[in-house]
Amino acid sequence: MTAQCGLGISDTVGRRVFQSCQGMLIGLVCIAFLAEFFAKSMFVLFFVAFGVLMALVLLVTAVVTWVCRGAQRRRWYQLALLLAWPLLLWSILFTSWPMSLSFAASTPALDRLAQQVAAGQTPSLPTRAGCYLIRAVETRPVSGGLAICLWTAPPERQHVGFVQSPAGVTPHVNPWTHRQLSPRWHHFAAD
């Protein structure tokens, strides 16, 4: 015997809908984490536009299903976990902590590669620098010295990647996509 909710769905169907919504929310969080971790900024912008709306729809569906399951079948920890996923998604998309984490882990490798380029040595490309695949390098004169550009996308398409410049100097690439990562390192998402 299965209990029916006011919406006419059985407990088994309600449980499956709830679990499916929670699984899709977990998937959205994982996709957002990986996109932000590997500095795929254009994908993150697309994801903010559509992924957040999808997360809200999934959250509302899951909460309605959870309420419909009846008091004897509800577990409060399930609702707490369900609410945690959108909060985690929000923190990833709006604080960029996965990018900070991957940059911190990759800084020594990026510094070594920038030193090679500054010394006039051209590395074989593409090359790995920590978490990032560097596809092109270039130097640009800036006030106070030289900016070393380590592009993660081919520069013919767009300038996406990391730029090391003298402390206090912001290189002129694209101010709309600029993110200061440290006193000397900057990330640019597109030209």
Image (cartoon, grey):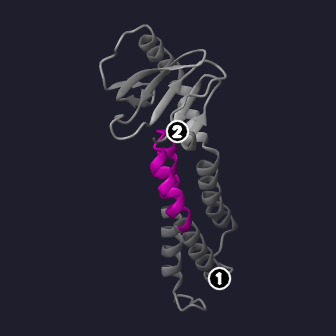
- Residue under the point 59% across and 37% down: 179
Q: Are marks 2 and 1 in contact (CB under 8 Å)?
A: no
- Residue under the point 53% across and 65% down: 22
**Which residue type carries mark 2?**
Asn
Quarter occupied by residue 120: top left
* Front tag of 2 and 1: 2
Q: Is 133 on the left or on the right of 54, as rendered?
A: left
First to last magenta residue range = 26-53
Residue situated in front as seen by the camera: 4 or 48: 48
Percent coordinates x, y for residue 20 in the rendering = 48, 69
Q: Which mark is residue 174?
A: 2
- Residue under the point 58% across and 79% down: 65
Residue situated in front as seen by the camera: 147 or 84: 147
Residue situated in front as seen by the camera: 109 or 149: 149
Q: Which mark is residue 78?
A: none
Residue 30 visible somewhere in the drawing = no
Report which residue position mark 1 lands on: 70
Percent coordinates x, y for residue 26 in the rendering = 52, 57
Helix, strand or loop status at disc 1: loop
Mark 2 or 1 closer to N-term? 1
Quarter occupied by residue 73: bottom right
Percent coordinates x, y for residue 156 in the rendering = 33, 36
Quarter occupied by residue 132: top left
**Which residue type carries mark 1?**
Gly
Query: In the displayed structure, would residue 147 be above or below residue 6?
Result: above
Q: Is 186 on the left or on the right of 123, as rendered?
A: right
- Residue 47: say if magenta: yes
Q: CA distance from mark 2 to mark 1?
A: 54 Å
- Residue under the point 30% across and 18% down: 124
